[in-house]
Image (cartoon, helix red, strand yellow):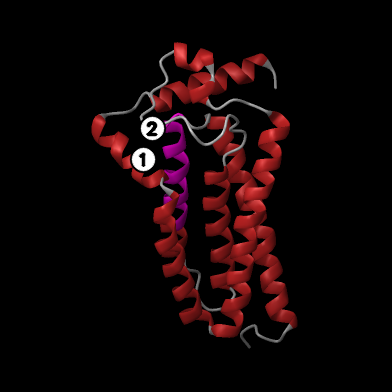
């Protein structure tokens, strides 16, 4: 990466991270907490079973699980290959006043964001799966899901865990993985004769 792009990424990250307050700090910490995702995942799984029936739903749920695993494994591979420090470990970012409220944790490297990849991948894959009913567009679900994924991603900047570039690449990677596995699930249901008539 050229130094000018790195500096632009640093400046954008600092500008976003600087929009903090004691109240918003607690909000961003809550949004970023992955333990709170599991009830949401469970609710989406129940919704998928309700809308698609158990046979198609099992295939869609399997594609969602694969999306999460793939996003995690790809991000871990890239993080250790690229070796870009998280803002909270970057001496220059600390000198320039990056705001952080949690323990450093999460590993040294942050390119690219697994939070962003998982959130956007999950929403993309589940939306494609739901739309396989051939009837509904699920616009409300799409809007709510992508807003949630965006908030999760922004929280990582606000907590100084990621640069903006980490988030953008993570979101794009998640959308790509979710799209491919969502389409694969749709193809499998079609080949198995489980698609709507």
Q: Are marks 2 and 1 in contact (CB under 8 Å)?
A: yes
**Residue beneath label 2, please?**
102
In the rendering, at what x and y percent does residue 38 appear?
Answer: 44, 60
Q: Horizontally, is 152 left or right of 7 in the view?
A: left
Across the whole image, how many numbered discs are drawn on residues? 2
Q: Is residue 109 above or below residue 4?
A: below
The secondary structure that dominates the magenta segment is: helix
Distance (Cα) linking label 2 and label 1: 8 Å
The picture places residue 106, in percent across and down from the top left corner, at 52, 36
Query: Does residue 19 appear left or right of residue 152 in this picture?
Result: left
Residue found 60% across the figure and 80% down from its top? 56
Q: Earlier in the sequence, mark 2 or mark 1?
A: 1
Q: Position of residue 176 (x, y in %)?
A: 66, 52
Inspect the magenta stretch and tell me whether residue 159 lies in it: yes
**Residue located 47% across and 53% down the image:** 146
Please indicate whether residue 160 sits to the left or right of residue 129 in the image: left
Q: Establish if 2 lies above or below 100.
A: above
Please report the residue visible at 63 percent of the width from the left and 26 percent of the height from the top: 84
Q: Secondary structure at mark 1?
A: helix
Assign the N terminus to one quadrant of the image: top right
The residue lying toward the viewer, choosing from 93 and 103, is 103
Number of the front mark, 2 or 1: 2
Give SS at disc 2.
loop
Residue 112, quarter of the rendered image: top right
Q: What residue range appears in magenta? A: 145-160
Q: Look at mark 1 in the image and give the residue it sits on.
A: 29
Between 33 and 15, the one lying in front of the other is: 33
């Amino acid at each position: 990466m050229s130094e000018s792009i790195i500096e632009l990424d640093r400046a954008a990250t600092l500008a976003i991270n600087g929009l903090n307050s004691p109240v918003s700090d607690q909000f961003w910490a809550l949004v970023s907490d992955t333990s709170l995702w599991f009830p949401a995942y469970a609710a989406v799984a129940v919704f998928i079973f309700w809308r698609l029936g158990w046979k198609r739903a099992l295939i869609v749920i399997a594609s969602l699980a694969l999306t999460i695993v793939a996003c995690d494994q790809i991000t871990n591979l890239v993080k250790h290959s690229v070796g870009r420090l998280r803002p909270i470990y970057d001496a220059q970012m600390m000198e320039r006043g990056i705001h952080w409220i949690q323990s450093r944790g999460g590993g040294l490297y942050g390119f690219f964001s697994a939070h962003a990849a998982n959130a956007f991948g999950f929403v993309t894959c589940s939306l494609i799966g739901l739309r396989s009913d051939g009837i509904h567009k699920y616009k409300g679900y799409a809007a709510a899901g992508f807003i949630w994924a965006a908030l999760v991603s922004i929280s990582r900047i606000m907590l100084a865990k990621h640069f903006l570039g980490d988030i953008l690449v993570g979101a794009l990677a998640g959308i790509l993985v979710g799209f491919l596995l969502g389409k694969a699930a749709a193809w499998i249901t079609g080949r198995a004769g489980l698609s709507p008539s």
